[in-house]
Image (spheres, helix red, strand yellow):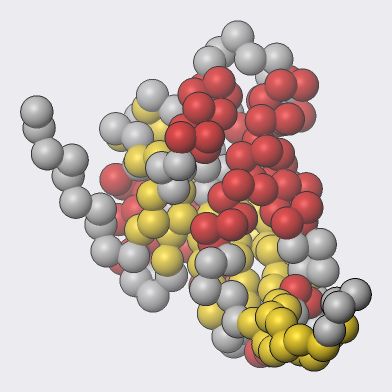
Amino acid sequence: MSKPSPLPANVHLIDHPLVQHKLTLMRNKEASTNSFRRLLNELSSLMAYEVTRDMATQDVEIETPLETMTAKMIDGKKLVFVSILRAGNGILDGVLSVVPGARVGHIGLYRDPKTLEAVEYYFKMPKDMQERDVVVVDPMLATGNSASAAVTRLKQLKPKSIKFLCLLTCPEGIAAMHKAHPDVAIFTAAIDRELNDHGYILPGLGDAGDRIFGTQ
Ligand code: URA
């Protein structure tokens, strides 16, 4: 049996069986828009557990029906999920179901069809970003152009930390992201074989935005 190849530095593969099962259902070209969206929602909430694993907690004093105790709580407001439009929005409901107090930012970048470079058209973040931890969300880390452009832009606001959460990536996407931002940890459910000449991940799942919004 061949040994699994070691993960690139700063990449977290979320290989929980439930995550892998749902991802397989999503990859299937027969999955309807409705089930694709529902599965993405479920997957996003499962992946949110991993990406928030090291979130700070604080001790609070509470009263149970029987006695007083010191217990742990998070400060959800300190977390910002930043969606890269438009496919990133497909991840928001799932992650917010786990951290409902989190703030949300949006960044709009389109991929120039010729150069595959990212061009910004929208940017709206919560205030006081220096006090917040950021998780950038986009289902596909493909060329890495929009992901690294989004992170470059966010770094201007000096947040406390930045992580990147996606469903699928490929060696090219990881290399591009880590070349530009080696400090940003990537959380993904799979690392696929390669990128094709049109910037699509193979075997992949097709165009995530089209499959989420039914715009094929
Ligand atoms: N964006 C997608 O939606 N799919 C890919 O395979 C690559 C980028």
89, 34: nearer the viewer: 34
Q: Quadrant of residue 207?
A: top right
- Left/right of residue 140 with respect to residue 9 in the rendered view: right
149, 106: nearer the viewer: 106
Q: Quadrant of residue 90?
A: top right
- The residue depicted at 78 percent of the width and 48 percent of the height is 93
When the figure is inspected, residue 121 is found, relative to residue 90, above or below; the finding is: below
- Looking at the rendered image, the quarter that the C terminus falls into is top right
x and y, in percent, of residue 215 in the image: 74, 23
* Residue 106 appears in the figure: no
- The residue depicted at 71 percent of the width and 39 percent of the height is 41
When the figure is inspected, residue 168 is found, relative to residue 179, above or below; the finding is: above
Q: Quadrant of residue 98?
A: bottom right
- Left/right of residue 2 with respect to residue 57 in the rendered view: left
- The residue depicted at 12 percent of the width and 39 percent of the height is 3
* Residue at the extreme top: 30
When the figure is inspected, residue 13 is found, relative to residue 114, above or below; the finding is: below
- The residue depicted at 35 percent of the width and 53 percent of the height is 174
127, 97: nearer the viewer: 97
